[in-house]
Every structure is written in structure tokens, then in C-alpha cells.
Image: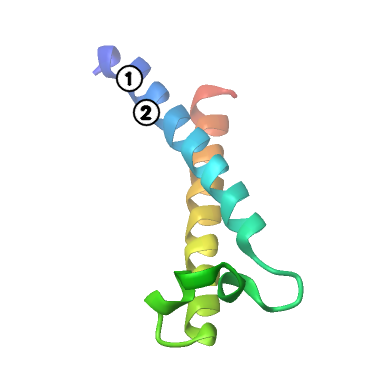
């Protein structure tokens, strides 16, 4: 089990980096005026409406922030980062 600890730490650090970059991108996609994904051309056609696009973007952002928070907590608590 002791030999797995470095791999777990590296995996969690990778998850933290990926979630941080994804969180930055998702926050930048949000529009301050409520346009959001609808202002990006054909991207909003994936969803049924602009409200659906904003709701989906909000959910994805919240889940990504949650993953970032949990991974940061685990790394800080168990590995002292």
C-alpha cells in the first residue's frame, strides 16, 4: 500500500490541475449580462434554449468547483500541500 501513495498523490495533483484549468475556462465562458453560451454562435443550438444552456453551464461549473474543492482538501489534509 505504501508504494501506491506517490501515484495517488500524482493522480490527485493532475485532477487538481485539470479541474483548475477547466474552472477558469468555464468561468470565462459565463457572460456578465446573462448572454452566456448564447453569444458564442452555434454552441447554444446543442441545448434546447438559452436558459437550458445557462443552467447546464452553471451545473458543470458547480461540479467542477466541487471537484477542485474536494481534491484540494484531500491534498492539503493527507499530503500537506
Quick one: which residue is furthest to the right in this view?
Answer: 33
**Mark drawn on residue 53:** none
Q: Are marks 1 and 2 in contact (CB under 8 Å)?
A: yes
Residue pictured at 50% horizontal, 54% vertical: 64
Q: Position of residue 68 (x, y in %)?
A: 53, 46
Quick one: which residue is furthest to the left in this view?
Answer: 1
Mark 1 element type: helix
**Above-or-below relation of 20 to 46:** above
Left or right of residue 66: residue 4: left
**What separation in Å lies between label 1 and label 2 (alpha carbons)?**
6 Å
Q: 41 or 61: nearer the eye?
A: 41
The residue identified by callout 1 is 7
**Above-or-below relation of 12 to 2:** below
Residue pictured at 49% horizontal, 28% vertical: 78
Q: Position of residue 60 (x, y in %)?
A: 47, 64
**Above-or-below relation of 41 to 15:** below
Q: Position of residue 1 (x, y in %)?
A: 23, 18
Amino acid at each position: 500500500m505504501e508504494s501506491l501513495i506517490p501515484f495517488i498523490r500524482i493522480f490527485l495533483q493532475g485532477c487538481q490541475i485539470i479541474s483548475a484549468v477547466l474552472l477558469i475556462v468555464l468561468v470565462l465562458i459565463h457572460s456578465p449580462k446573462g448572454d452566456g453560451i448564447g453569444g458564442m454562435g452555434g454552441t447554444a443550438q446543442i441545448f434546447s434554449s438559452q436558459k437550458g444552456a445557462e443552467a447546464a453551464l452553471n451545473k458543470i461549473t458547480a461540479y467542477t468547483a466541487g471537484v477542485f474543492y474536494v481534491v484540494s482538501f484531500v491534498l492539503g489534509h493527507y499530503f500537506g500541500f
